[in-house]
Image: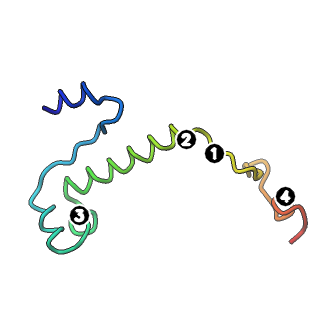
Amino acid sequence: MIAELRQRYADVLAETTVRESIRVPEAAAAHAPITTFAPASAPSADYRRFADELINRHRQAAGPRRTGLPMATADRPLSGAAVWGDDR
């Protein structure tokens, strides 16, 4: 079934799958996220991987950030004057 879903919805379906564990319903019963209830569990790692995947997809879709502010580099650290245009 998963292979069929991946074939049909490859452009929107996440690569990450969340494994089943008794710890997930235990966390729900305790009104706690699995990542704090059982941080070393497989589902906890899977949810973190899924979050990373979503963040990376968003970053790729958004492209480079342009804030209009000067960027600091190792050779050129920013000072208040560079950011604000004066010596605040």
Q: Amino acid at mark 1?
A: Arg
Disc 1 versus disc 4: distance between alpha carbons?
A: 19 Å
Residue assigned mark 1: 65
* First in residue order: circle 4 vs circle 3: 3
Q: Position of residue 64 (x, y in %)?
A: 62, 40
For label 2, the residue is: 62
Relative image position of residue 44 (x, y in whole percent):
25, 57
Secondary structure state at the residue bearing disc 2: helix
Q: Residues within 10 Å of mark 2 (few under 14, many from 20)?
A: few
User: Which of the numbered marks, if any, corresponds to residue 34?
Assistant: 3
- Extreme bottom residue here? 30
- Point out the frontmost of discs 3 and 2: 2
Secondary structure under badge 3?
A: helix
Q: CA distance from mark 3 to mark 2?
A: 29 Å
Is 52 located above or below residue 41 in the figure? above
Q: What residue type is disc 3 on?
A: Ile
The outermost residue toward the right is 86
User: Which quarter of the figure has residue 79?
Assistant: bottom right
Residue labelled with disc 4: 82
Mark 3 or mark 2, which has the lower sequence index?
3
58 left or right, relative to 15: right
Marks 3 and 1, the one that precedes in the sequence: 3
